[in-house]
Amino acid sequence: MANYEIKCINKIDRNDPTERIQRVGGYSNGSNWKITVAEAIGYIESKQHSFYVTKNGKTVWVIVAVSRYGNKYIKTEADGNEPNNLLSLPECV
């Protein structure tokens, strides 16, 4: 299993902090990568890859969660930091 650091996100409405994340991205082996949240969920659940963000020098793992409506999404494990680790990342280009 490979570990990938998420460094950026794409949301439906970048100005609304509650909007859903559509894609996540980062840098690996000198190149950029960007995948859909559905792909990230598939990789996490199949244990092919794991994802994390770095906040204040600390690794925070990305996990799959299920909304009260039964929809899967990604979030970081609770680390006591605000704002949300994923939603505070810059926009992927």
Image (cartoon, rainbow, N blue to C red):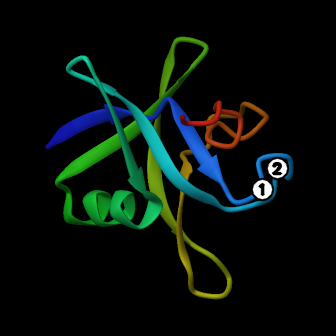
Q: Position of residue 37 (x, y in %)?
A: 46, 60
Q: Identify the image quadrant of residue 29.
A: top left
User: Residue at position x 70%, y 60% from top?
Assistant: 12
In-image side of 78 versus 30 (left or right) = right
Residue that protrudes farthest toward the bottom in the picture: 69
Mark 1 lies on a secondary structure that is loop
Q: Position of residue 68 (x, y in %)?
A: 68, 83
Say which of marks 2 and 1 sits in front. 1
Q: Residues within 10 Å of mark 2 (few under 14, many from 20)?
A: few
Label ID, residue 17 = 2
Can you identify the residue that label 1 sits on?
Answer: 13
Q: Residues within 10 Å of mark 1 (few under 14, many from 20)?
A: few
Q: Amino acid at mark 1?
A: Asp
In-image side of 10 versus 30 (left or right) = right
- On-image quarter of the C terminus: top right
In-image side of 84 versus 39 (left or right) = right
User: Residue at position x 85%, y 46% from top?
Assistant: 15
